[in-house]
Amino acid sequence: MYQVIGKLSNRAFRVVWMLEELDQPYELLVTNPHEETATAHNPSGKVPVLLVDGEPITDSAAILQFLADRHKRFTFPAGSLERARQDSLIHMINDEMDALLWTGTKHMFLLPEDQRMPDIRRPLKWEFGKSVDHLAAALGDKDYLMGDEITVPDILAAHCLNWAFGAKYPVENEKVVAYGKRMRARPAFRKLNDAAKGAG
């Protein structure tokens, strides 16, 4: 059984979502960043952490790709052109979406008050809007980013879009809005989203 350190209200949602999609058993060790359970397995205190036979794997994108490779689903083989394109999408989403959302979040809540610049969210939102258009271009006429089935970047992108809706970042491209709805309609997402709401 896998163990996931984190909470459904943070990036651990991505890891648990992947495990649900893979129909793999897991235990969620509900932990905030920098709490003892987190720092015991990741010196930075960041979550999520995936424990595999007691060994930690950190970074949500790395964890998702590990799980996809291990269970041979939602990914393409290493060394293939499709895998290179898939990896490119992962990096694009992390660089152009996740990083903008995370920077805005830190300046609203997480940094020491004297280090916060809440107004930074205005240019971040403008840049995020451009990133949404980049995602639409990558999506093209496909249902999912790599074709007819979800892959690792879809879970990352959908989580970022959900985060963006909550943080009031612009998601105005109709193609991306429809894509986000397809991803959120997946049974595994709905199950975890309901659980996250129930957890407050």
Image: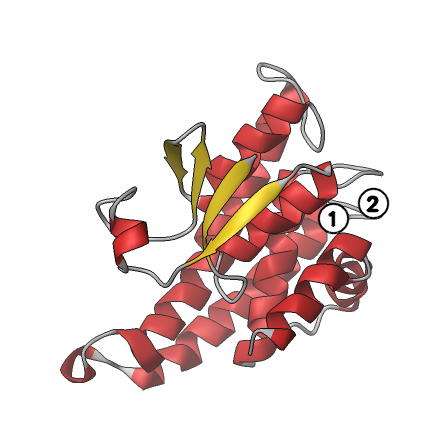
Among the 4 quarters of the image, the one containing residue 67: top right
Q: Decide which of 91, 112 is in the foreground and name it.
A: 112
Residue at image position (56%, 60%) is: 131
On the image, the x and y values in percent for residue 169 come to 55, 76
The crowding category of the residue bearing disc 1, from other C-alpha atoms within 10 Å (few below 14, some 14 to 19, many at least 20), is: some
Residue at image position (72%, 68%) is: 173
Mark 1 secondary-structure assignment: helix
Among the 4 quarters of the image, the one containing residue 74: top right
The residue where tag 1 is placed is: 139
Among the 4 quarters of the image, the one containing residue 121: bottom left
Q: Is residue 1 visible?
A: yes
Mark 2 secondary-structure assignment: loop
Answer above or below: position of 31 versus 78: below
- Amino acid at circle 1: Leu
17 to the left or right of 54: right
Colouring rule applied to residues = secondary structure
Q: Which circle marks residue 120 in the picture?
A: none
Q: Are marks 2 and 1 in contact (CB under 8 Å)?
A: yes
173 to the left or right of 52: right
Quadrant, the C terminus: bottom right
Q: CA distance from mark 2 to mark 1?
A: 6 Å
21 to the left or right of 182: left
Residue at image position (48%, 46%) is: 4
On the image, the x and y values in percent for residue 32 come to 36, 63
Answer above or below: position of 78 versus 186: above
On the image, the x and y values in percent for residue 122 come to 42, 81
Q: Decide which of 69, 19 is in the foreground and name it.
A: 19
The residue where tag 2 is placed is: 142
